[in-house]
Amino acid sequence: MLYQFYLIPGQFEGVNMTLTALKISHLDQLNSKIFALLSTLFSRLKIEHLIKQIGITLAIKKAVH
């Protein structure tokens, strides 16, 4: 009987550790997806910003000449 008493808390501890590891793994995957999306979004915004800047500078140069 004592053997079973000591075995059960050890089993629950393992399950809790496994659930924690799964939660951490899931959060890591979610963070990776979010950062990938943000980096893609920011690169697009940077490109659009550069195009707008070039367009503005070209328009100014044409107006000056």
Image (cartoon, rainbow, N blue to C red):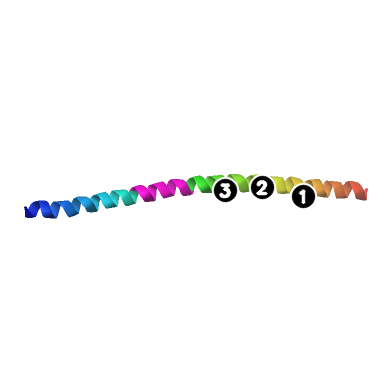
Q: Position of residue 44 (x, y in %)?
A: 65, 44
What element does badge 2 sit on?
Answer: helix
User: Please, what is the three-letter code of the amino acid marked with disc 2?
Assistant: Leu
Q: Which residue is mark 3?
A: 38
Relative placement, left or right, of 7 versus 42 is left
Label 3 environment density (alpha carbons within 10 Å; few <14, some 14–19, many ≥20): few
Find disc 2 in the rendering and name its residue.
45
* x and y percentages locating residue 46 in the rendered image: 67, 48
What is the spatial separation of the Cα atoms under label 1 and label 2, in whole angstroms? 12 Å
Q: Secondary structure at mark 1?
A: helix
- Main SS of residues in magenta: helix
Residue to which mark 1 is pinned: 53
- The number of numbered discs placed on residues in the rendered structure image is 3
Is residue 30 rendered magenta in the image? yes
Q: CA distance from mark 3 to mark 1?
A: 22 Å
Is residue 46 or residue 11 the one in the foreground? 11
